[in-house]
Image: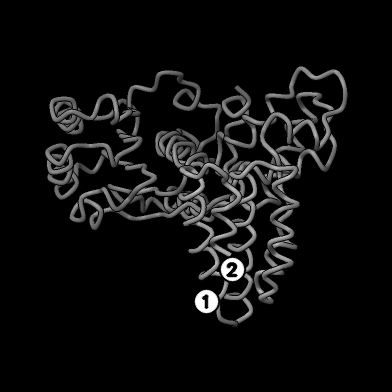
Amino acid sequence: MLYNVYRPTSFRDVLGQPAAVVLKNLVHRGRMPHSLLLTGTRGVGKTTLARICARALNCESDEKPCERCKSCRTKRHPDIFEIDTAAYGSSDSISNLIHSMQLAPDYSRRVYIFDEAHTLSSKSMSMLLKSVEEPRSSSIVFLLTTDPDKIDIALRSRCMWLKLGSLDKRNILRLLARVSITEEIRISRQALVAIADRSKGSARDALSILEMFSDREHEVTEKDVYELAGERVDTSDLVNRMFVGNTKAALDEIDRLYTFHASKAIVDSCLSELASRMRSNVENGTSPLLPMRWMKAVSKSRLDFANSYIPQRALEVAL
């Protein structure tokens, strides 16, 4: 898979995440906390950053991670433990891991990476809390999650919390352009932009979509992306008519859109457009109330059209 092939292996390779700079500085200054909570949506680099940090902490060189020393070149590192808590998060498994935290590392630090940490049971979290409260100097725990609210509040409070944001379109495009050139995928600029739009800030999702076109002989176009990864609907005219209160013109635009596009694509595009306008209002110091009201109404229509014989009517009722 392309996202595994091009997964960053050093802090400098991580795009658009200030948390990478924070972790790099902590490693180089020798001030790494014993427990860290990395949060963010899927595909933004939580696991990647934890792995890089684990390698850096055990690196034998001044340039961490150097990717050349014995520790960095070790495939199955004896001091790095990556736990899929959804599969191995039982209290018995956690108990064994906590016991291993008391052992001396083979290199420098024993690093425990708990992926999908929110799936840990309450008992497992309580056991982890005890080890985090009385940490061994050579052990470090990473908790990775897309849902930090499900992490025990006491456990959460004892971690350094780093929030990873979705990647901006510019960084996604840079990544897609570099990978497409390296993999010799002929693809137009417009197609790359379409992939970036669909990735919703996830580098993994962007590379997964790009991989769909890796065996194409002709140049990949924007239309190819729409056909394989879903269509993009321009709802800017509809939103404009909503905002000025021109109901008849907005209803006419709904008629036109439903002639060519599916309900879900129209509503999702409309919500995306409204979200952009809400952010723009906030940045410009104007009230976001109007786009927020519209988002609430359109969101309800998305629920309603699932049970509607004529999905178009749900959006019309919202209007």
Q: Is residue 68 left or right of residue 245?
A: left
Nearer to me, 117 or 21: 117
Say which amino acid is labelled 2: Arg
In percent of width and height, residue 7 lies at: 57, 32
Say which amino acid is labelled 1: Leu
Q: Which residue is mark 1?
A: 289
Badge 2: residue crowd in 10 Å (few <14, some 14–19, many ≥20): some
Q: Is residue 140 left or right of residue 261?
A: left
Nearer to me, 138 or 264: 264
Badge 1: residue crowd in 10 Å (few <14, some 14–19, many ≥20): few
In percent of width and height, residue 318 lies at: 54, 62
Quarter-of-image position of residue 59: top left
Q: Which residue is drawn at the image coordinates 44% and 37% (left, top)?
A: 47
Q: Which residue is drawn at the image coordinates 60% and 40% (left, top)?
A: 203
Q: Is residue 312 above or below residue 42?
A: below
**Number of callouts in the render?**
2
- Quarter of the N terminus within the rendering: top right
Q: Which residue is mark 2?
A: 279
- In the picture as drawn, the residue positioned furthest to the front comes out as 309
Q: Are marks 2 and 1 in contact (CB under 8 Å)?
A: no
Residue 119 visible? The answer is yes
